[in-house]
Image (cartoon, helix red, strand yellow):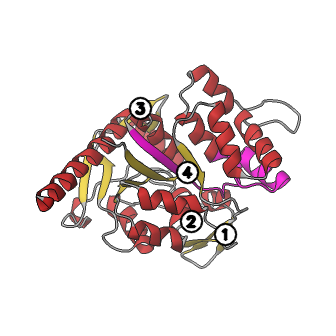
Amino acid sequence: MKRKKIVLLGGGTGASTILKGLKYFPVDITAVITVSDNGRSTGRLRKEFSTPAVGDIRHVLSNLSTLPDEIKDIMEYRMSTYSDLNGHSMGNLILTSLYKKTGSLKTSIEYFSKLLRVEHTVLPLSEDYLTLMGETVDGEIIEGEEEITQANKQYKRIFYKEEPTIFPEVFDAIADADLIILSMGSLYTSLLPHLICKDVVDSINKSKAKVMYVCNAMTQPGETDNFGVSDHMKTLEKYLGKDTIDVVVASNTKIDNKILKKYETEEQKDPVIIDYDNLNLENLELIEADLLTTIDNTIRHNSLKLSSIIFSYLMRWYYVFYNHNQRRNF
């Protein structure tokens, strides 16, 4: 049987967490990553060298690597020095150097993938220098991905300052996919930057693939205060249209009260509640499971548990589809 094809749309820690576990399953993965991050090392390199953002791409490639952790960790290592190198990660510097040498982010990713022995495909959403913009509910326009996050505001819409040219292979991957995953992560700065591109949405709606949304475990200050699973779904439907998402995966883990208090007081974050009454479960499958773990007082999705659920859903749907077609052909 041919390996099933998965396309993941996202960026940052959320996408990396899924891919870290999913790489162990017999599937072909294409991860499409946003390139508008302007914070920390990535932002400084963007400004100095006029490159697309490389930080999320580096993080995804490191987590897809088949090399020992000790070697992968070198790419995540951040310089601590009084020079201009302070705060830069080794992987960011290598990717930026490759980009300046080749003039192509895609080619740079291919070289970096060989270096890290990555067996799957990582594509940039675009090779353009993109600036993410946000319009708050009170009409304020905020420029920059980092600034959107730090403002702690609710947003009416997200858009790009420039008109992005989507990388052509993104459309090919979506068209060939068996499953499209909308990754957890920052709703407004990691996931919606894909969905504000009309051509990407059109491609998803034309695809034969099932569409899965992996919902966030915690809210984000300002942006998603008091959001339940249904509020995340409604936000996505504004861009995708109704009934595009076939299945949503959400955590029902009972989190320790001390950890919850820490998140509530120090980070102004609360658990995302599965608000069953507000979900249209006639046209949507809900998969809920104990998906979270706590590491060093930080709540994280368990990568292998989550990946197991994704793979099980993919194969269950495939066999139902396959058997249905077999009966029709018979």
Q: Three-letter amino acid code at disc 2?
A: Lys
* Mark sitting earlier along the chain (3/4): 4
Pointers 1 and 2 in contact (CB under 8 A)?
Answer: yes
Q: Three-letter amino acid code at disc 3?
A: Tyr
**Mark whose residue sits in front, 1 or 3:** 3
* Mark sitting earlier along the chain (2/3): 3
Q: CA distance from mark 1 to mark 3?
A: 40 Å
* Mark sitting earlier along the chain (1/3): 3
**Mark whose residue sits in front, 3 or 4:** 3
Q: Is residue 177 visible?
A: yes
**Mark whose residue sits in front, 4 or 2:** 4
Q: Is residue 270 visible?
A: no
Q: Which residue is mark 4?
A: 11
Q: CA distance from mark 1 to mark 2?
A: 10 Å
The answer to which image quadrant residue 94 occupies is top right
Which quadrant of the figure contains the C terminus?
bottom left
Is residue 269 within the magenta segment? no
Q: Which residue is mark 3?
A: 24
The disc label shown at residue 301, or none: none
* Mark sitting earlier along the chain (4/2): 4
In this rendering, position of residue 101 left or right of residue 204: right
- Judging depth in this view, the residue of 325 and 169 nearest the camera is 325
